[in-house]
Each structure stands twice: as structure tokens, then as C-alpha cells.
Amino acid sequence: MTIGSNARKVDRMIILGIDPGLQVCGYAVVKTGSGDDKLIEAGVFRTNSKKELAERLCQIAADITEILEKNKPAIVAIEELYSNYKHPKTAILMGHARGVILQRSAESGAEVRSFAATRIKKSLTGNGRASKEQMQRTIQRVLGLLDRPEPNDVADAIAIALCCANEKRI
């Protein structure tokens, strides 16, 4: 899914990868170019699970807005939701967080792209069912990092941004 069209094919562009979550959201800012990608910033923002849903969503909105304003990405890449039939409430709650992130990203003028988890894994490793450890090792190698990216939320956000960068190069 693509929302907006402000991103143009340029030699260098900033991509913000987001691993959405209601309690913890991972994010990664990647500068991409003709074959070389550089990690600019990565981290997580958290909400207080003891607060009401509306307050938590407001916190996510404020945090994503701060990241968008600071980094001014051309593209925001976000992981699609998947639902485990044993835990449908989790997917619904995650959908609220993802919706806030999508709205703020589109409002910023960035192009918004969504990617399925299997597509992200296949883009980086060639295997749509790659393990978390395999993804972390691939990210470490591709970006020339000294250590594997952690926590998983950060690694996932980096992977999402790199997947988007790979698709932009095609």
C-alpha cells in the first residue's frame, strides 16, 4: 500500500522504518543511495501500559511526530499487521497504534509504504521465513555494524527500512 507521492527517486533519500506496537515501537532512520545504506538513528519509544489506551495513543503520536520532524523522511515504511487467531485482541490493539503512526506519517507529507513480515525477510535474506537471529546478522553485515542490532523492535525497524530501500532501487 502506498499513501502520498511526495517521495521522488533521488540519489540519496531518508527512509524511516517503523515496527509498530502499542507498548514498544521500534524505529530506524536509514539514508539510502545507489547501493549503500547508512543507519542514521535507531531506537524505541514506549508507552506506559498502566495508562488508558487514548493516553498511550497520544504518546505514540507525539513520539512519531518528533521523529518525523527531526529526520524529515521522504518515505515511512511500516510493517503490516498480522493476526494470530489465538490472540485477536492483540492485533486490534496494535492496529490502533499502527493507525496513529500511519496518520501522522501521511500528514507529514512522506510517502507511506507497508510491507508484510515475510516480504521484509525475503528482501534481506532471500528467505521469507528467516529467524530473528538471521535477520540481525544480515543487518549487521549490510550496514557494517560492530554488533547485531537489538532489541528485536529496533532490528525489525531497520529491516523494514532496508526492505523499502531495496525496493526503491529495483
Image (cartoon, helix red, strand yellow):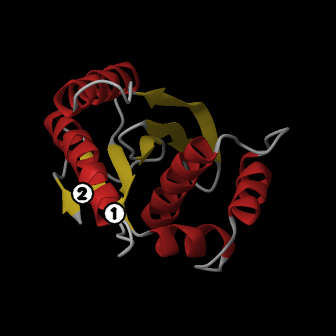
Q: Is residue 22 left or right of residue 42?
A: left
Rendering coords of residue 16 (x, y %): 42, 41
Residue located 71% across and 42% down the image: 149
Q: Is residue 104 left or right of residue 120?
A: left
Q: Is residue 76 above or below residue 122?
A: above
Residue receiving disc 1: 81
- Separation (CA) of disc 1 from disc 2: 9 Å
Residue located 78% across and 45% down the image: 148
Quarter that holds the N terminus:
bottom left
| Residue 137 in sight in this render | yes
Q: In the rendered image, which quarter is residue 68 located in? A: top left
In the rendering, which numbered label is found on residue 92? 2
* Identity, as a three-letter code, of the amino acid under mark 2: Ile
Q: In the rendered image, which quarter is residue 21 located in? A: top left
Mark 2 secondary-structure assignment: helix
Q: Residues within 10 Å of mark 2 (few under 14, many from 20)?
A: few
* Identity, as a three-letter code, of the amino acid under mark 1: Leu
